[in-house]
Image (cartoon, rainbow, N blue to C red):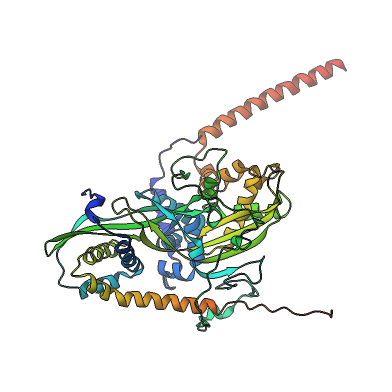
Amino acid sequence: MYVAVKGGEAAIDNAHRLLAHARRGDPAVPEISPEQIGGQLKLAADRVMAEGSLYDRDLAALAIKQARGDLVEAIFLVRAYRTTLPRFGYSEPVDTAAMAVERRISATYKDLPGGQVLGPTFDYTHRLIDFLLAAGAAPPEPAEAAAGEGEPMARVTDLLDGEDLIEREVAPDGDTPVGDLTREPLDFPAERDLRLQALARGDEGFLLALGYSTQRGYGRTHPFVGEVRYGEVAVEFVPEELGFAVPLGTIDVTECQMINQFKGSAEVPPQFTRGYGLVFGQSERKAMAMSLVDRALRARDFGEEVTAPAQDEEFVLAHCDNVQATGFVEHLKLPHYVDFQAELDLVRRMRTEYAARRGEASEMKEAAE
Amino acid sequence: MTAVGPGEIHPADDDREIAARQAVMAVSAAARREELDSVLAALAPLPEASDLRRPETGLVMTRGRAGGDGAPFNLGEATVTRAAVRIAEGGRTVNGFAYHLGRDAARARAAAVIDALWQLPGRRQAVEAALAPVHERLMAGRETAARRTAATRVNFFTMVRGED
C-alpha cells in the first residue's frame, strides 16, 4: 500500500522542465521530427503500434519522441491516449490472403504458389556496423523486376488441401461473439480469440523468451515456419448508418503461420497442428514468437499435459502486457513510507523478542552448567 | 447530431451502385488531403455542405482471423476519423459519409463532400474524372512497390551433388 503525501510540487515541476530539456538534447543538433521517426525508425513505431494496440503511425512516432525513445513508455502513452477516444465499432476481419505482399517466405515449401519474395529484410545481412550511414550516404535505387500478373499467394496451410494433413481452421457463423479484453477483464480459462488478442498486444521480449523456451524443450511443439508474410491489408468497417462495408484504408501487418508436429486420436487421423501470429507493422520476431506461444497455449485443445510456462495460459496472459507489468513494477517507486514504517516496527519487535529469547537461553545454559 | 435512417441514404442501391461507391471511397481513403482539396477545387462551384455530423476522431477495433481464415479475434484498435455532410442541389438532397484511418478531420470532411457529390447523378462523372489522377497515382505507387518486391523474388536452383 502507498499513501498520498503532499509536498514536492515545485520539485516535480522542475523535474519535468529538466526532462523537456534533456529530451531536446544538444541544441546544436537539429531537432528530430515525428515524421523522421515514423519514416526512418519505422520498426520502432511499428512496435509501439503493435503493443500500444493502436494503429496510428504518426501518433506512435510522436509518442516515441515524447518518451525519448523509451518504447515501453511510448506504448504507455499510446494506451493512455486511446482511452480518450470513443469506439465506433469493430472492423470486418482483415483478409491476409488478399495482402499486397512485400515479403513472403516459407521454410516448408521451396516452390510454393506465388513464390518467395524477400522484401526489405535484415536476413542475410552480415550484421556489420555500416559507417556509411553515419556519413549520410544516399542509398542506391531499389532494383525492379516485372511483377507480372501476380500469381495469387495462397495460404501455405491451404496447399495440402483435400488431404487434411494440416489442421484446418473453422470459421464460426457471423453472429458468434468475439471476446474483447479492452471491454471485459480477462478471465480464465480464456478462449483462443482472447488469447490471440492478448498475444497480439503482448510484450515482444516476453513472448520471444517464451517462444524460445518452447524450442528449448519447455513445452516443445516441433515448429516449422509454414509462412511469414508482410504487407498491406485493407480494413473495412460497416457503419450502422450505411449498412455496407466502407474501406477505411490499409494497414501494414505481419502474419506467421507456424506448422507444428502432429496430433491424432482414435477418431482423428494424425495431422499437423498450427499456431498463428498476426501483428501490426513489420515484426517477424513478434509474429513468430506469437505463433509459437499460441500453439503452446493450445495444449488444452490437444489434451497435452501442461508442464511448461509457455503452456500455462494464466501465467502467459496475465504477464504479457508490458503496460500492466511496468505499472506494477514501477509503482514500487511511489512512497511506501507507512508500509515500510509498519514493517520496520515489526522487525524491531521481532529483534527485541529474539534478543530476549537469546538472553533467556544463555541464562538457562549458564544455570545448567 | 442528426440521426440518419439507412433507408434515407440508399433507397434503391443495388450491389453495383454500392461497389462503385465503395471504389470512390477507397480512393478517397488512400488520398492525401491536398489531393482531395484539389478534387473539390476542380468540381467548383460547389453547393453548400452542412455537417450532419461534425468530423470526429474515434477508434475502430480491427479484427483478424485465427490462422487467417478461422474464427475472428480482435487484433488491435486504429484511429479513425469520420465525417457526414448533407448537400442539396437540383432538387435532390444527399448525405455523404467518410470513415478514414488516422486523425485528419479536414481530409475526412472533404471525402464526405466527395461521397455526397458522387451520389448526384449530374455530378458523378465529373467526380470520377476529378478523382482519376489520384487513382492513377495510387496505382503507379502500387505498381512500383510490386516491381521492387518482385526484384527480391528467390529463384531456387538445386545443386546436384555426387553421382547417381
Where is residue A157, by image quadrant?
bottom right
Residue lying at the far left in this picture: please name it. B91
Residue B102 visible at all: no
The one nearer the camera, A306 or A349, is A306
Where is residue A306, by image quadrant?
top right
The one nearer the camera, B72 or B91, is B91
The one nearer the camera, B86 or B91, is B91
Residue at image coords 22%, 74%: B126
Give the total number of marks visible in the rendering. 0
Where is residue A288, by image quadrant?
bottom right
**Residue A71: x %, y % from top left:** 51, 58
Residue at image coords 64%, 74%: A124
Residue B150 visible at all: yes
Vertically, is A319 above or below A209? Answer: above
Residue at image coords 39%, 46%: A9
**Residue A369: x %, y % from top left:** 88, 18
**Residue A271: x %, y % from top left:** 68, 53
Vertically, is B50 above or below A306? Answer: below
Q: Is residue A169 left or right of residue A241?
A: right
In the rendered image, which quarter contains the C terminus of chain B?
bottom right
Q: Is residue A137 left or right of residue A234?
A: right
Residue lying at the far right in this picture: please name it. A369
**Residue B83: x %, y % from top left:** 27, 58
Q: Is residue A362 left or right of residue A67?
A: right
